[in-house]
Amino acid sequence: MASAADEDHFVTPGSEEAAPPGVLRKAIAASAIGNATEWFDYGIYAYGVVYISTAIFPEGATEATLYTLAVFAISFLVRPFGGIFWGPLGDTLGRKQILALTILMMSGSTFCIGLVPSYETIGIWAPVLLIALRMIQGFSTGGEYGGAATFMAEYAPDDKRGFCGSFLEFGTLGGFSFGALLMLGASLALGTEAMHDWGWRLPFLVAAPLGFVGVYLRSHMEDTPVFEEIESFEEQETEVGTELKDLISDYWPILLTLGGMVVALNVVNYTLLSFMPTYFAKQLGLTTDQALVVPIIGMLFMMLFLPFAGHLSDKIGRKPMWWFSLIGLFVLAVPLYEFMATGLWGALIGFAVLGLLYVPQLATISATFPAMFPTQVRFAGFAIAYNVSTSIFGGTAPALNEGLIELTGNPLVPAYVMMGACVIGAVALVFVIETAGCSIRGTELPGTEASERELREMDIEEASRAGATS
């Protein structure tokens, strides 16, 4: 890893030609559609917990809600295996082929959840099928996010990577909000009885067309210029086993650093997006509709600020954005949770402020994390570190918070968990190299002097090749 002296060093963007605006827009859309599909699934699952629990688990089971949240967490246990499987393939075969497969599996498993018979119909096989489909979804997601962020980052201009990357997270909130609104709309239109009977299944079926759109967009894109460049120099990884060995032996400090940042990122993320509807209803006493509407309004509010935060990170750097977010969340988590407990308006304002404090992290993920690795191990390094940390600390956050509240009787537990996660993220952030404005081409760590030297050599060789063929 580079020394601390490198962390604020901004490099002039690489000499490669920027992708034409139309191609760049297609690349952003192809990346964001997968994220939207992934979080659409989370949205309908989180907002349909009460219906899923009564349909899939035995009637009258007192812990049905906790079981349903636990199944949500189980899907995250296989995400690291997905990262280990898909990541190295993305670095050897290319980004777009893997991304077409992952979105197809991801949307297909979500669609099939809507077809699972009830416990009343097939007994224990209902939760077994739900668990199996959630595991397929988790396995495919293990390659989806790291690949999509890598794909976008390698297409984006160096001086606009934060702005372009923010639209990937626009897909996160957009997909989650769309899923949540669809489940809420079905609930309002069909009524409680119909939703418990069959209505909860309808939103899951919408995943199929989302998946087909994603496959179409991704299959009609060329692979990233950054990957094709090292491929032309024959410097990409050629064997999966070799890449994993090199990744662990040479880049383990970066894997740990990224994993620490993901602890903060995803504990906050899954608490705000997935756990809040349950928390508002069970702990704060909001009605079911209010508990569903408040986070949706908050997420739509957050979406407005994502591009601005991404653009600002291109100007001042990623690390200042993260420091602001981590310190703000640590200081204000408990006061904001106490304010949310004052009623509907308190919940709405408190959630919105928490969301705004989180935006600087969310808006910069897709620009920060891919730039922590060189091209030949970027997909795998991101996918493995991100998914191992997410499986342990992120997807388990809803079930952990629910369990700790029941154990302690303290409704402020989620705030304390959030604060602890921010401390871990802050420690990791100290070791991150600032890469805003840096090129992410080549096989050296972006933002270091070695990377600058390599880029100059690559540009000279490319110019020499061009002269030889002219």
Image (cartoon, rainbow, N blue to C red):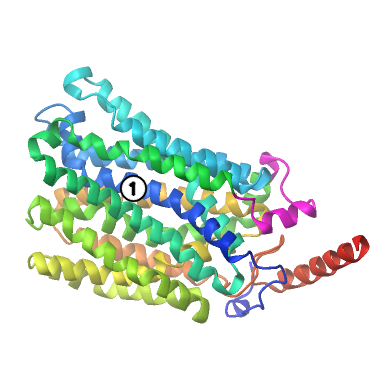
Which residue: 59% across, 49% down? Answer: 380
Which residue: 36% across, 69% down? Answer: 359
Spot occupied by residue 443 in the image (x, y as percentages of width and height): 71, 60
Residue 374 image-quadrant placement = bottom right
Depth order, front residue of 123/198: 198
Which residue: 29% across, 52% down? Answer: 178
Residue lying at the far right of the rendered structure: 468
What secondary structure is marked by label 1? helix
Depth order, front residue of 314/75: 314
Asked whether residue 370 is in view, the answer is yes
Spot occupied by residue 243 in the image (x, y as percentages of width and height): 67, 46
Q: Quadrant of the N terminus?
A: bottom right
223 in magenta = yes
Spot occupied by residue 58 in the image (x, y as percentages of width and height): 15, 26
Asked whether residue 400 is in view, the answer is no
| Placement of 22 over or under 43, stated as above or below | below
Depth order, front residue of 266/147: 147
User: Is residue 55 found left or right of 424 in the rendered image?
Assistant: left
Spot occupied by residue 152 in the image (x, y as percentages of width and height): 55, 58
Q: Which residues are magenta?
A: 221-242
Residue neighbourhood size for the residue with mark 1, other residues' Cα within 10 Å, grouped as few (<14), some (14–19), many (≥20): many
User: Is residue 439 found left or right of 414 in the rendered image?
Assistant: right
The residue at which mark 1 appears reads as 40
464 in magenta = no
The tally of labels here is 1
User: Is residue 126 found left or right of 423 in the rendered image?
Assistant: left
User: Is residue 197 found left or right of 247 in the rendered image?
Assistant: left
Residue lying at the far front of the rendered structure: 22
Tell me the kind of residue under disc 1: Phe
